[in-house]
Image (spheres, rainbow, N blue to C red):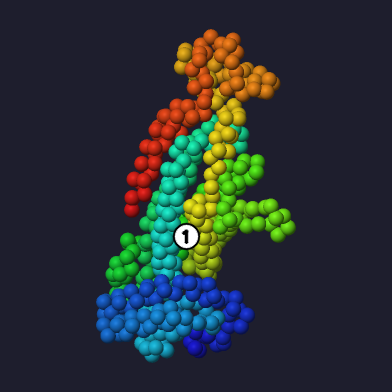
Amino acid sequence: MKEQQTWSQRFESALHPAIARFNASINFDILLIEYDLTGSQAHAKMLAHTGIISQEEGEQLVTGLEQIRQEYRQDKFHPGVEAEDVHFAVERRLVEIVGDLGKKLHTARSRNDQVGTDTRLYLRDQIQQIRNQLRDFQQVLLDTAEKHVETLIPGYTHLQRAQPLSLAHHLLAYFHMAQRDWERLGDVSRRVNISPLGCGALAGTTFPIDRHYTAKLLNFEGVYANSLDGVSDRDFAIEFLCATSLIMVHLSRLSEEVILWASEEFGFVTLKDSCATGSSIMPQKKNPDVPELVRGKTGRVFGHLQAMLVMMKGLPLAYNKDLQEDKEGLFDSVNTVKACLEAMTILLQEGLEFQTQRLQEAVTQDFSNATDVADYLAARGVPFREAYNLVGKVVKTSIAAGKLLKDLSLKEWQQLHPAFAEDIYEAISPRQVVAARNSYGGTGFAQVKQALLSARAQMTTK
């Protein structure tokens, strides 16, 4: 198509083939075709609505665009590099279908506001899909947590044994991370859902368009109030990449814990065959590939965020060709996050088995009940700091003697302080240590059961 090869009459020759390939984005922005068609249909309807073209012409354009949609869905539409991008590919095919009328579609529109519209429509759709996946992930966390309210697991700080926890409480921490992710994406979606259509190349248009009409047709919540901002803004994409980076942080943290739990040193979980692989040389191995891949893929999403920030930081207003580079990283981040959420949901649902006996043994073989000894004394009038120092002393002597706190005789306890009585043994038993932490948001069984109810209620939020 000569007009596309030489642009306007300002140009005398076509692009060098290598530059044409370098300049083209059709290989990746074809992903936007359905959104481009939807946006173009709304634009055609607006042109007819405002009298810029006739109603009949508007209907013909809409029908022609719908034919292209069906051709694409039937795998019959394969534009090449000569089309440069998805927008020109659609326009060229439309002209083939409806004739010169197809050339009217671009009236009062630029590729600058067109691509901004397409990207927002795409991202709005993807955000909803990711939020749905987050809900599935949360559901599995809740279902698993409900089975393990009274299963105990060592809690850690600095990766050192700290205090025992309800396993459900531990899993619910990830539920709340995912809840923030779900809410954060909802907040981002509101800023994604603003229409730049009608901003033109940068300054608006002389035609009597109705931007609010197209925004309503496309279910946008509003329109950009400044045409320069409308065509050059990528804040919404950066915000999305920030949100997806945090999702990956949370998935990666859980992945790291699963990897540790599945090791022989921990032995807290067993990987099922459906979600693990073996070694090509060591027949005894069962590798946690799913969480390792999630942990590894996290860097990809971080990298795309950094790339977008670096790209945007020096761009003068308004549109610059640099902005073509926003899409591949955005598309890859969407695909990566969706794949990782799906994989981790499956892993939790059917790929792990918690070793409750091993977990029970783990919480009885350490000094993670030491704080409860200090609390025991503090409840009987001993200043906490004094109690803290006394317990530090008994832990030291117990380690030297090869004993745990539960192994000390009542006489040994009372030699430490006369406030100790027979009930010290119940007070420092792992189940009581967990049950006693009944402050709001704590790991006490009563609190965890209430937290599960609250979490279920949060899941009903739209």
Residue type, numbered disc 1: Ala
The residue depicted at 29 percent of the width and 82 percent of the height is 59
Q: List x then y, in percent, for residue 166.
A: 48, 36
The answer to whether residue 3 is left or right of residue 303 is left
Q: Is residue 392 visible?
A: no
Please state the horizontal and vertical placement of residue 399, each as a whole percent of the image: 66, 23
Q: Is residue 81 visible?
A: yes
Name, please, the residue furthest toward the front: 357
At label 1, counting other C-alpha atoms closer than 10 Å, the crowd grade (few under 14, some 14-19, many 20 or more) is many
Q: Nearer the viewer, residue 218 or 102?
A: 218
Q: Could you say where residue 119 lies in the image, as x and y percent from the top left?
A: 44, 67
Viewer-side residue, 227 vs 307: 307
Q: In front here: 173 or 365?
A: 365
Q: Is residue 229 above or below residue 114?
A: above
Depth check: give the residue in front, 282 or 184: 282
Q: Which residue is mark 1?
A: 237
- Residue at point 46% right, 57% down? 240
Residue 95 lies in what quarter of the image?
Answer: bottom left
Where disc 1 sits, the SS reads helix
Query: How many labels, in total?
Result: 1
Q: Residue at x 62, y 41 (%)?
A: 266
**Residue at x-position 53% and y-position 44%:** 354
Picture coordinates of residue 154, whole percent (x, y): 55, 35
Determine whether 322 is above or below 67 in the image: above
Lateral position of residue 287 relative to residue 330, left or right: right
